Image: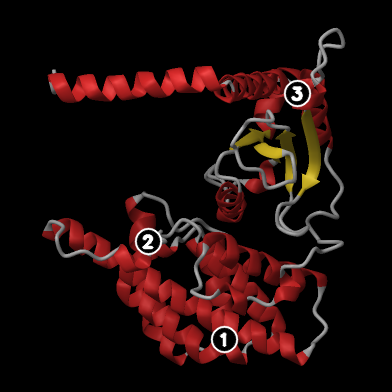
Amino acid sequence: DAPLDSALPSVRALTISLLAATQLNLPAMTAEELARLLRGLSRAGVAWKSLSVVAHKALASALQKLAGRMTSNDLASSCHSMCVLTFDAYIPPNPTASLSFSRPQQQQQALDGDWQAFLSMQSGFQSLLTAVNLLSRTQKQLSVAEREQLAIFAQFLRVMKIVPDPSHIPSHLLRPHSTSSSAASSSSKLHDRVVGGLLAALTPNPSNPNPSFGWEVRTEASSFAGVFPVDIMVLQRPPPSSSMSSHDGDWEVVALLEVDGPSHYRCDGQLRRKDRLKEAMYLARHPESSFYRVRWDEEDQVGAEVLGEELAAELCARRQQCERRANPLVRVGEDLGQQLGNFMHWLLGPQ
């Protein structure tokens, strides 16, 4: 659990030495040792993008050789660890257009390095996915934790668009889960206080109700078939003429909130990568939403009511902006203003 991504020179030197020794020993590792290595790297704050190209290729090669030999527990752990390692790695929006030799040499070299890192990462995920499909065909009984880790892995591959053919992801891992180890945990008093403050702040004025454009607050809600739930999900019903997409029927997810106790943070105060993984997945799933975090010490200092009021104020400002954009005259006026501004900038040039 010791963070190895610290900028301190002594820690950095230790990290370089450890990674060099790891890279040297990778070809001789067993499947169990590789699973432990991936778990250790992910828990120590190491990111895929911080590793060398040689390390990328070595890990991808080891996964290709050993993923199929892992036990169900080690395979599920490795799948989850790879998600934690790679959620902030370079993922090209259009792989076929990512390489262009018309770019300056320095820029192209950086892009080539990102591209090679992505290819190694994709190869590693493909090896794990092949092993997961093999495990699925054996119909082995999985523990709740193993099933949840594999379900998160499947949802990660789909939402981040890493594998070339998402149809290879086992469909049973994408289906709704009735229970999960994270969703089944009881909420804390801190969580309940923040939810109460937010609900109180979002309660509409009885003298001016607006049911067609209301709020809905859900707790322990998941956008991934029951796994990886967030503490609070705020939805609103868009205006009838709104073009904003919704992933929840007629309701649009506008805000996601995590209430973080001390266990979510490392000894140096940084948020753990497994928590940042959840944030990355939800923002990829709901790109127009906002993600908020409430630390336990913030709630202690200002109180749940104040936090709820601040968040509600931001959401109401967003709603007003959405209502303005829903008005055709306002939208046309804003578009014409933008076009006029662009024309004047072109006509007058930079000042």
> Of residues 281 and 80, which is closer to you in this image?
281
Q: Say whether disc 1 or disc 3 marks the residue closer to the N-terminus.
A: 1
Specify the label residue 67 is tagged with: 1
Left or right, 45 with reference to 14: right
Secondary-structure class at tag 3: helix
CA gap, disc 2 to disc 1?
23 Å
**What is the three-letter code of the residue carrying label 2?**
Ser
Left or right, 164 with reference to 341: right
Which residue is painted at 65% across and 80% down in the image? Answer: 74
Q: Which residue is mark 3?
A: 304
Which residue is painted at 38% across and 74% down in the image? Answer: 119
Could you tell me if the residues under marks 3 and 2 are in contact, i.e. CB atoms within 8 Å? no
Secondary-structure class at tag 2: helix
**What is the three-letter code of the residue carrying label 1?**
Ala
> Of residues 23 and 107, which is closer to you in this image?
107
Q: Which residue is mark 2?
A: 50
Q: Say whether disc 2 or disc 1 marks the residue closer to the N-terminus.
A: 2
Specify the label residue 189 is tagged with: none
> Of residues 180 and 290, which is closer to you in this image?
290
